[in-house]
Image: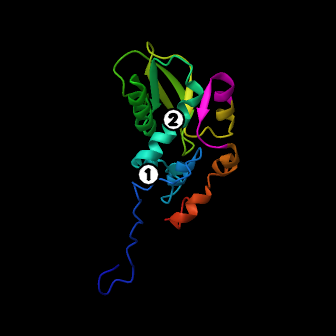
Amino acid sequence: MGTAGSSRALRCPVLMDLWRVPSSRETGWYLALIAPNVKGPSYPWLDPSRLYCHWQGLQDCIADLLQPFCEDPIDLVAGIDAMGFILGAAIANTLQKGFLAIRKAGHLCVETCTQPYTDYTARQKLLEMRMDTIQPGIAAICIEDSDGGKWIQEHYKCSQCVPQHLMPQFNRHQLESFQAFGATPGQA
């Protein structure tokens, strides 16, 4: 739609059906809800917030992430700033456990330990967390086959909800489901 005399039409986003649940809910069915980056290289390559909006998708994602830990005593859930706060808090609530926020450096007013990392824009940054609360164990929507991802998997018990046959798509940062959005990452 556009106004009279306007040569540029406004794109109307396709609304997501938050109530439709597929009859076959295979592991990872909800990954198609993840949207691509359409704003360029200063943003992450995908946006899981559509997954968080779908009640059954979020519930199934949490169940899949927790599966490898079902026999483990979990006393605390941690999430990394900022999108990890949403998923981590939802998992903590499901387990009726506490939640630890791993923050970007400079936001916590208590004693912390820090860890350098490279973000999605290739900039060096620091993460920090309280020193008195955490024990090893990791769950994530996806742990890429990068050097960092391999290091995490070698040092911690891990869980991810990406089926093995979809890992090449995640490693390429181009999911087939992105075609439904009519844009490729980085395209405005």
Q: Nearer the viewer, residue 162 or 108?
A: 162
Q: Quadrant of residue 178?
A: bottom right
Disc 2: CA contacts within 10 A as few (<14), some (14-19) or many (>=20):
some
| Residue sitting at x 52%, y 53% | 23
Front: mark 2 or 1: 2
Query: Colour scheme used in the picture?
Result: rainbow
Would residue 109 be found to the left or right of residue 136 on screen? left
Would residue 181 be found to the left or right of residue 166 on screen? left
In the image, which disc is placed on residue 139? Answer: none
Task: Look at label 1 and name its amino acid.
Answer: Arg
Would residue 175 be found to the left or right of residue 36 on screen? right
Disc 1: CA contacts within 10 A as few (<14), some (14-19) or many (>=20):
some
Q: Is residue 155 magenta?
A: yes
Per the rendered image, the range of residues in magenta is: 151-163
Using the image, determine if residue 106 lies above or below residue 146: above
- Name the element at disc 2: helix
Q: Quadrant of the N terminus?
A: bottom left
Residue at image mark 1: 50
Using the image, determine if residue 32 lies above or below residue 73: below
Query: x, y (%) of residue 67?
Result: 57, 30
Q: Is residue 144 magenta?
A: no
Query: x, y (%) of residue 170?
Result: 63, 48
Q: Is residue 104 visible?
A: no
Using the image, determine if residue 71 lies above or below residue 179: above
| Residue sitting at x 69%, y 39% | 145
Q: Quadrant of residue 13?
A: bottom left
Task: Look at label 2 and name its amino acid.
Answer: Ala
Residue found farthest to the top: 132
Distance from Cα at disc 2 to Cα at disc 1: 17 Å
Query: x, y (%) of residue 35?
Result: 50, 55
Residue at image mark 2: 63
